[in-house]
Amino acid sequence: MRIHLGIEEDFRPARKAHPAIAVADLDALARLLSEAGHEPTWDDSIPEVRRFYVQDPVGNRIELMQG
């Protein structure tokens, strides 16, 4: 999968809107991101969906999930 993002001159990261990406091994990805300095923020508000959020380098929230 590829996600292409653009940059705008007056860019402000969205607080709520964000992409959600389904992955096969959420725990392995969480470890890799943590080791790279991007600490996951786990969210258990939807019981049947395992997910966490990370921030990209410019502050956008990205959701990663395994359902």
Image (cartoon, rainbow, N blue to C red):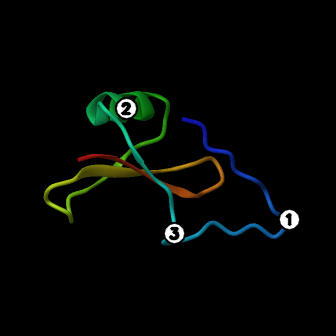
Q: Is residue 28 above or below residue 52?
A: above
Q: Is residue 25 left or right of residue 59?
A: left
Q: Residue at x 51, y 69 (%)?
A: 17
Sequence-wise, the earlier of marks 3 and 2 is 3
Residue at 85 percent of width and 65 percent of height: 9
Residue to which mark 3 is pinned: 17
Residue 36: % across, % down: 49, 30
Say which residue label 1 marks. Answer: 9
User: Which kind of residue does numbered mark 3 sit on?
Assistant: Ala
Do the CB atoms of the residues marked 3 and 1 lie less than 8 Å apart?
no
Q: CA distance from mark 2 to mark 1?
A: 31 Å
Q: Position of residue 2 (x, y in %)?
A: 60, 37
Q: Alpha carbon of mark 3 to alpha carbon of mark 1: how far?
A: 19 Å
Residue 45's mark?
Answer: none
Please tell me whether residue 26 is drawn above or below residue 7 in the rendered image. above
Residue depicted at x 76% and y 53%? 6
Residue type at tag 1: Glu
In primary-sequence order, the first of circles 2 and 1 is 1
Q: Which residue is mark 2?
A: 29
Q: Which quarter of the picture shows residue 7? A: bottom right
